[in-house]
Amino acid sequence: MADDSAGNGEFSFFPFVVDRIAHVLKRLPSRELADGSPSKEVNEATWYEPPENYALRMIIMMVVGMKILLMLQFCCGTKLLDAFRIRPEHKNKFFGWIIILNLALIPLCKIRRLGFQELAFMLMPCHFVNLSCGLWCFMPCDFFLYIVLGARINSFIAIVEPEYADDFMLEVYTYFWQHLLLVLFPCFVYVWATPPVPIPVSNVPFWTLFIITLGGLFYICCAVPLSLILDRNITYMMSPPPIWDKFVSPEQMGGLSFVWALFICMYLSHFFSYIFAVVESRAFYLFRRTPPTGKSKKKQ
């Protein structure tokens, strides 16, 4: 359990709002999280930290996240608007339906075998990224593609170190298919899309910060109450995986909580995924002998 004395000093900020949010969290159903922990009262031992810590984290993420989004909109608003521009020449509805139908198999298998509460795991990042692949096929725009590009390192790790327990064969198939898709989908886009899709080098820091901020707003502010309501520890937002406490002590982390450490790792993985995407797009440019901006070079 977290050190309460360390948290109480932080609670002096926004005390009324923190108390109100913590009060709401405590009133959510008492359930056992699906992390192997024994059944205990939700507002006591089920919490890895005091409920006030989660409430404070939500406030910090909302304030900082909105400031970051407003700053990006003010400084790079044109880039953001351009990212939502549809490129109708890149549509591939057939491939899009394959992706969407494969994604729909996952909740059907989970509900049939484990019950409605397993739908909570459809909020895992990999499913959002798979959905972005499908949406890109119907509405090709840079926004959906950049979501996929940022998740490639994590997707590769998920293939090398798969995380499934007693899933039956169809679920194992969908697991590997969806993560292989996340790794290979940009290659498919580079080869198939005409004119080629641009991957601007100057946008790497912008998209890294933008996508991670959106993810932080959703998971930090929404995943905790959804975990309590649906009885599942979504993306380890309620409590870290067991291996965290086994190999990492609070002293080693300098007081940094698992959630903030997770988002630092996500930021770095997205940043290097975008760097890899830039290098990869240049390689495909050489392969296709076509400028990555989609415009042919002028003859000398």
Image: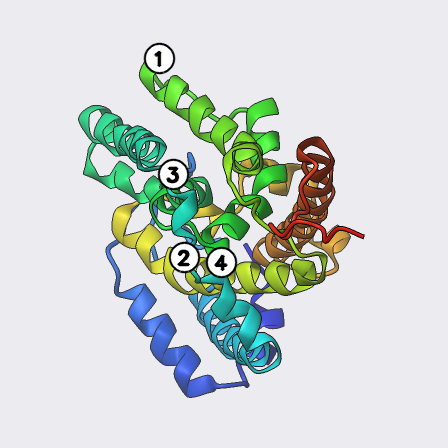
**Badge 4: residue crowd in 10 Å (few <14, some 14–19, many ≥20):** some
Q: Is residue 172 above or below residue 57?
A: above
Q: Position of residue 121 (x, y in %)?
A: 35, 40
Q: Amino acid at mark 2?
A: Ile
Residue in the picture at 44% in, 24% down? 177
Find the distance from the CA under tag 2 to the CA under tag 3: 50 Å
Find the distance from the CA under tag 1 to the CA under tag 2: 37 Å
Helix, strand or loop under label 3: loop
Q: Position of residue 284 (x, y in %)?
A: 68, 35
Question: Badges 3 and 4: C-beta atoms under 8 Å apart?
Answer: no
Q: Position of residue 100 (x, y in %)?
A: 30, 36
Q: Which mark is residue 169?
A: 1
Left or right of residue 280, residue 145 in this image: left
Helix, strand or loop under label 2: loop
Q: Position of residue 108 (x, y in %)?
A: 21, 29
Along the line of sight, the residue nearer the viewer: 93 or 176? 93
The picture quadrant where one finds residue 90 is top left
Q: Amino acid at mark 4?
A: Gly
Q: Which residue is mark 4?
A: 215
Q: Which residue is mark 3?
A: 38
Q: Which residue is mark 2?
A: 86
